Image: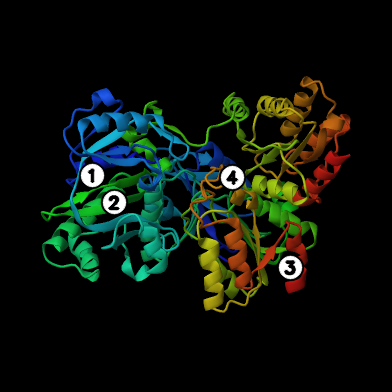
Amino acid sequence: MAILAGRDIRVIIQGITGREAASFTKDMLDYGTRVVAGVTPGKQGQEVHGVPVYDTVRRALKRHTADASVISVPPGMVREAVLEALENGIKLLVVVSERVPRKDVIDFLEVAREQDARVIGPNTLGIISPERVKLGMAGGPVDDVKKAYVPGNVGIASRSGGMTTEIANLLTTHGIGQSTCIGVGGDPVVGSNFLDLIPLFDQDPETEAVVLFCEPGGIIEESLAEMVISQRIALPIVGFIAGRFMDDMPGVRFGHAATIVEGDKGTAKGKVESFKEAGIHVAESFSDIVKILRDVM
Amino acid sequence: MRLLEHESKEILGRYSIPTPKGDVVGSAEEFNMDGPVMLKAQIPLGGRGKSGGVIEVSSAGEAKEKIEHLLSTPIRGYRARKILVEEVIAVSQEFFMAVTYDTVAKDPLVIFSKEGGVDIEDLSATQPEKLQKELFTVRARLPQYRAREIVSEAGISGRKLLGLGAILSKLVDIFLDYDATVVEINPLALTGDGKLVALDCHLEIDDDALYRHKDQAEKLSLHDRYEGGRKSTDFELRAAEIDNLDHRGVAGRMIEFDGLLGLIIGGGGASLTAFDAVRQHGGRPANYCEIGGNPSVLKVKELTKHILAKRGVEKIAIIMNVVSNTRVDLVARGVVKGILEAGRVPSDTVAVFRVPGAWEEEGFKILSKYGVPYCDRSVSIDEAAKMAVERTRC
């Protein structure tokens, strides 16, 4: 069993007629994901790569059964799209859209929490459980996904979308397969961060170790370290912390909105130290991830 | 977007939170108040008082002199273009209140202390029990009864409780209505005659929400707010121009460094990884950048030429994560063209080309044709960085 999404999960795409959404819909279908319907208000009756389009989620669900929604709509419409999915009982939402106002994110996460639904993202490339399912853009077209991702026993959670595939590729190159790979999203607040995902990986019989890709900014890594200690989590975790050079230049703003170093919190160095104190393995170089996994598995 | 103090206080005024009587001036001539006043340099920084940005003066003459001084003296890299002139308030007690997001709890958080003032950060570190913290939800906001509960927990009762509760509740409204990421009043003063007045205010608006706060966003284009901050170098400005050549992908976000190894790296996380790896192996980068989202050949070409035009840069390393969106062949074509147009030899100039993924066969074909050293996905980002550093040495 992978986490979050298995082979049988049925998916709708909100915003399916958008260029990017249409493109990843095809990639998801090619990978074998069961995309049952799409939703774009005003475009009911159209088809996107053979997937029927409906005006509303409710209409789509009258004809189809769905467990998850991948949402790719303009930033100002994300909040309503998420609320629409939640109101119609969808329990797993993957929000691909970026630049969503933080208040909107917090607002829909509060509703999701009340309804016991799980949100990945926003600003995520999505999820891949190799050879089973792919939700969102992660990995690109099917041939590229197959080259980088193979099934196995290592989970990946990454604050960078591109590095999710890069880590999978590194593991695959060295004969290590993956259980579930998740781009958590690049924003300061995301629906499922490391604190939310590690317990799921920990309970997954298939996952024997997890690799985390971390960046400066925020206090999620520091909080995870505390959680690993307090809950005595035994699952081996390997953390790679990128952007160490940023410690020398506080105040410089990088592309990833989350990597804004504020004061003395959220530095790469601080994250490395808190991981080590909690027994989380820190890969000093990117390739070391493989060596450490071989030691701990 | 960080608002200046006087811009933030204008918003407080709209919510009937009292602020000192005052005026904003851009020169000594504009000053027309009497008697003792506070002069406050309008720069987007905290801790202005400790850096000489806040001055109390006793006469109009002294005020004019000090206004000129504040307008001409940089404070920690910033220079004020506006001075906030305010009446002097007799303070009997200082409070602290702030609203921000708790990124772990994923809820907004209100913070209150009856020991406000300049040392609030020390207080937070040494006596955290003196700060009341409480989560709330976007939907429920913070009704006055909840605000009063928080103030009451801090040991305050009577008229102060009512006044503080009302202001705290309004501050939450401001935070949500303006899509703030942080709003803080410190100090909120209790005056000698029992009134509450916000002496300073710090408000930052979520950049991703600026589109629905056009009146605030417009301020960003004003040239007379303040000067300073980290100035972009000419090298960085030119890179930004290149990124704006067309709308296809990103080939910019350049930061200049003083080394000699040029870098074309991307996307975001991979840029951080590659830059660290180059330094870890003893390399000294000439620049940081982020490319991604399938930039056009034109952009990559111009970026390559631009980096090679930097004094002393002989070699350039191109490193990206396994790409699915960006096309390897377009990156390869852009890099080779840029090197040729710069009058250099591709095989000597590229320290390493490590961009695997979409359209890689086509890309590798172009690179082979020019004898450019490239590696495929079996070579990791840090191994590629090591190769680049080693090739730069010889």
Kind of element beneath mark 3: helix
Residue B156 visible somewhere in the drawing? yes
| Towards the viewer: B261 or B42 | B42
Kind of element beneath mark 2: strand
Is label 3 on the same chain as label 1?
no
Q: Amino acid at mark 3?
A: Leu
Kind of element beneath mark 1: helix
Q: Amino acid at mark 2?
A: Ile
The CA distance from mark 3 to mark 1 is 54 Å
Residue B185: assigned label: 2
Residue at position x 16%, y 33% in the image: B34
The CA distance from mark 4 to mark 1 is 46 Å
Residue at position x 72%, y 25% in the image: B309
Which numbered disc, 2 or 1, marks the residue that appears first in the sequence? 1
Say above or below: B256 vs B131. Answer: above
Q: Where does label 4 land, which residue?
A: A24
For the C terminus of chain B, which image quadrant? top right
Is label 3 on the same chain as label 4?
yes
User: Mark 1 falls within which chain?
Assistant: B
Whether pointer 3 and pointer 4 mark residues with C-beta atoms closer than 8 Å, the reply is no
Residue A293: assigned label: 3
Whether pointer 3 and pointer 1 mark residues with C-beta atoms closer than 8 Å, the reply is no
Single out the mark in the foreground, 2 or 3. 2
**Residue A107, position as x, y percentages in the image:** 36, 54
User: Mark 3 falls within which chain?
Assistant: A
The CA distance from mark 4 to mark 2 is 46 Å
Whether pointer 2 and pointer 3 mark residues with C-beta atoms closer than 8 Å, the reply is no
Mark 3 burial class by Cα count in 10 Å: few <14, some 14-19, many 20+? many
